[in-house]
């Protein structure tokens, strides 16, 4: 995976009712997201940042060395650049306090979803990461993926019929 400095879109301000696919990699691509306490702590801090910036976390998937998020702005003031900064700041700080060490690589990756890109297709892609990586055969067996908006079973049922 490319680990240089990805650029934001220059002609887009990242504020408003938009959807984004985000990926944050761990520092030195260490396998930190393999235990429930770490994932729970990081997810709670990402959720805290999302609430403050008025974003919904439609889908998330913690892979051993990175996390995928599908987020959606819920107000005209929802600021994705601020969400990214705060999510990494809050989770990095709490991780450092509890587990000692650096959590994140400096930069992350974002994709602004176009109107024609279906939320369900992007969610399916994110949630199927553990299956594609050979970590599980059935997503129901993977403890580090889900949604903060939908029940995982309902989300998967909806994705199956989408």
Image: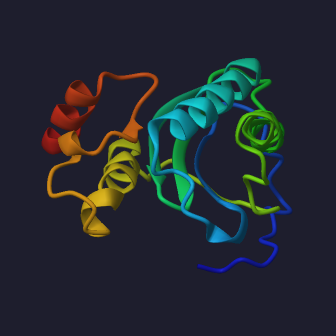
- Lateral position of residue 117 relative to residue 41, left or right: left
Q: In x, y percent, where is residue 155?
A: 27, 31
- Regarding residue 114, the answer to whether it shows in the image is no
Rendering coords of residue 19 (x, y %): 58, 41
| Residue at (73, 34) in percent of width and height | 98
Q: Would you say 149 lies left or right of 68 here?
A: left
Q: Nearer the viewer, residue 87 or 6?
A: 87
Q: In the rendered image, is residue 62 in sight?
A: yes
Q: Nearer the viewer, residue 29 or 78?
A: 29
Q: Residue placed at 82% from the left, 37% from the top?
A: 93
Q: How many marks?
A: 0
Image quadrant holding the N terminus, namely bottom right
Judge whether 122 appears above or below 57 on screen: below
Q: Residue at x 28, y 45 (%)?
A: 142
Question: Dividing the picture into quarters, in which one does residue 136 lie?
Answer: bottom left
Question: Residue drawn 46% across and 44% down?
Answer: 35
Q: Is residue 133 left or right of residue 67?
A: left
The answer to whether residue 142 is above or below residue 134 is: above
Q: Position of residue 9 (x, y in %)?
A: 79, 62
- Residue 6 occupies which quadrant of the picture? bottom right
* Residue toward you, 17 or 104: 104
x and y percentages locating residue 31 in the rendered image = 54, 62
């Amino acid at each position: 995976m490319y680990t240089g400095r990805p650029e934001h879109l220059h002609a887009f301000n990242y504020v408003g009712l938009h959807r984004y696919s985000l990926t944050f990699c761990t520092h030195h691509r260490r396998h930190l997201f393999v235990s429930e306490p770490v994932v729970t702590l990081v997810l709670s801090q990402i959720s805290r940042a999302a609430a403050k910036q008025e974003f919904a976390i439609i889908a998330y998937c913690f892979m051993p060395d990175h996390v995928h998020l599908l987020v959606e702005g819920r107000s005209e003031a929802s600021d994705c650049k601020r969400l990214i900064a705060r999510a990494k700041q809050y989770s990095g700080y709490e991780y450092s306090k509890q587990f000692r060490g650096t959590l994140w690589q400096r930069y992350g990756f974002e994709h602004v979803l176009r109107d024609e890109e279906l939320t369900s297709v992007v969610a399916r892609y994110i949630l199927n990461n553990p299956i594609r990586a050979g970590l599980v055969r059935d997503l129901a067996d993977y403890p580090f993926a889900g949604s903060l908006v939908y029940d995982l079973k309902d989300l998967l049922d909806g994705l199956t019929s989408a």
